[in-house]
Each structure stands twice: as C-alpha cells, then as structure tokens.
Image (cartoon, rainbow, N blue to C red):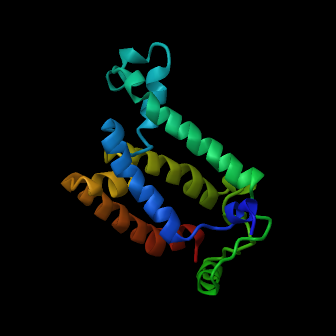
Amino acid sequence: MGILEILRQPWPWYVAGPLIGLTVPLLLLLGNKAFGISSNLRHACAMLPGSSRIGLFNYDWRKEAWNLVFVLGVLLGGFVGGVLLANPEPLQVAASTQRELAALGVETDGALVPRGLFSWANLLTLPGLVLMVGGGFLVGFGARYAGGCTSGHAISGLSNLQLPSLVAVIGFFIGGLISTHVLLPLILGG
C-alpha cells in the first residue's frame, strides 16, 4: 500500500488518539502552551483595527500567534485531506445508525453529512435554520461562556486536572444527549 492509499484511509483511533494526546504534553513542555482552538476567534477579532477599544479584545494577541498558525494548519490540513486526498468511496454508515436516522426522516447518501439536513436549500427551512444557524450560535456562545470548546476542556483541561474543565465536559455530554434524544426528534418531527 502506497503512502497516498494510507493517507486516504480513515486512521484508526489507536493512531489518531495518541497523536492528539501527545500534542498536549508537547505543547506544555516545549512552550508552556495550552491546546485549544476556540480562543482563536477572539484572537482574530483582536487583530482587527480599533478592536482594542473593546475590553474583551484589549490584550496582546501577538503572544498567541502560534495558535493562529495552528488554526491555519488545521484549515490547510482539512483542505488537503478533504479535497486533494479525498477518499472517492461513499461514507460508510453503520446499519444501526442508518435505521436511527431513517426513523427521523434523514437519509444517508454517502456524503460526509446528510445533504437532506445540511445544504443551502435546507438552510431556508425551519429545521435547517434551527440546526445550522441556531446550533452554530449556541455552540459558539457555549464555547465562549464555558471559556473554551470541547477539545480545549476535554483534551487540555482534563489532562491538567482542572475542575472547571471536568464540569464543562460533563455539561457538554449532558447537552449532547439531550440534543440527540430530545431536541433533534422535536426539530425534525420524528
């Protein structure tokens, strides 16, 4: 198997998980940095001219430039992985998941996300507006309110034994369960 074939395959958890897990101590040991990505929106806003007049953005964002480079790498990696090295085979979804989604009226079509839910045409429907715009707003608000996103709290915060991260992660899981089992069926009318 060539390197391109290896890169096009899904990486198993025992490869991707340790790579992500080893990033946290490497960042701490090499530069006393904390792993996280959601704070970059704040850094990007702080870069804008005149933003220092707003208290939230009045800090030296240049000290966090490494994190902005990290985000740029994530975007470039996503493009390379999702476009240049994209697996041409349709996405494989477990039969049990297909049945659960079908009960909600969602058809899996081999795309990364169901096109029946996430498309420009569906954005103008009430369920699409609630899921994409309302959900996006709540995720952004929640990450800001919790002082970080799921990856920052679950990967970096828990590895540093921070109690606020444990509370945030428990809240993320409870919110995910409520969204999956209560809100999503209500929104989709399933």
* Residue sitting farthest toward the front: 2
Question: Observer-nearest residue: 150 or 183?
Answer: 150
* Residue sitting farthest toward the right: 88
* Image: 42 above or below 118: above
Drawn side of residue 184 relative to residue 103, left or right: left
Image location (x, y in percent) of residue 146: 31, 48
Please tell me in which quadrant of the rendered image residue 85 appears.
Answer: bottom right
Q: Residue at x 25, y 59 (%)?
A: 166
* Image: 55 above or below 171: above
Image location (x, y in percent) of residue 98: 64, 81
Q: Residue at x 66, y 63 (%)?
A: 113
Drawn side of residue 3 relative to residue 188, left or right: right
Please tell me in which quadrant of the rendered image residue 119 appears.
Answer: bottom right
* Image: 37 above or below 49: below
Drawn side of residue 151 relative to residue 115, left or right: left
Residue 120 seen in the current view: no
Could you tell me which quadrant the N terminus lies in? bottom right
Could you tell me which quadrant the C terminus lies in? bottom right
Image location (x, y in percent) of residue 62: 42, 22
Q: Residue at x 40, y 24 (%)?
A: 61
Question: Observer-nearest residue: 99 or 76?
Answer: 76
Q: Residue at x 33, y 50 (%)?
A: 25
Question: Observer-nearest residue: 67 or 179?
Answer: 67
Count of marks, rendered view: 0
Question: Observer-nearest residue: 59 or 12?
Answer: 12
Image location (x, y in percent) of residue 68: 49, 33
Residue 64 seen in the current view: yes
